[in-house]
Image (cartoon, helix red, strand yellow):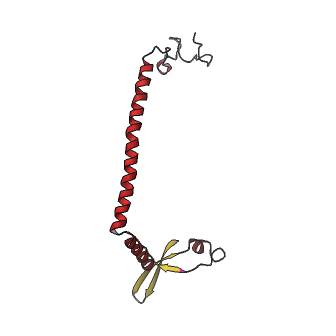
Amino acid sequence: MVAQTTTRKKGTDVYRYGVYRCGFAKTKGPAVCTHGTGYRQERLEAAVVAKFREAMTAPTIDALARMVNTQLEVVFQGHGARTAELTGEMARLEGQSSRKLPRQVDTSKADFRGASGLGRNVRGGTWPRRS
């Protein structure tokens, strides 16, 4: 459905009407969709709002709130267990990082003119071998 406005003049008065109609009938024409009926905006929106009001009674809202609260409790119960698991994993990894690791050279701060011997060999365009 697409919304469409129609303007009509009667004497000096101007009337605007909002209408909902089939999108294919509007854009593609009767060769694709022959449903040319338009539905007045006020009537259609009033019917939709009435159905929402009818559905949103106090017991329905209470049931919906209970369902949402139950789902939130389940999520937060799992959150505490996941936090403990991640904390233990971080402690294990920090313990491993205290071991002696191979020396890593930060080539981003190396002198590229070749004075330090690190980084890119400008003449050959290759990285020097590390022994």
Residue displayed at 39% across by 30% down: 87
In screen coordinates, is 107 left or right of 29?
A: left
x and y, in percent, of residue 23 in the image: 56, 71
Residue displayed at 42% across by 73% down: 51
Magenta stretch: dominant SS?
A: loop
Residue closest to the eye, 73 or 30 = 73
Residue displayed at 55% across by 80% down: 37
In screen coordinates, is 3 left or right of 61?
A: right
- Picture quadrant of residue 98: top left
Residue bounds of the magenta highlight: 29-37
- Picture quadrant of residue 90: top left
x and y, in percent, of residue 4 in the image: 49, 74
Outermost residue, top side: 131
Q: Is residue 93 magenta?
A: no
Outermost residue, bottom side: 11
Q: Is residue 31 magenta?
A: yes
Residue closest to the eye, 50 or 40 = 50
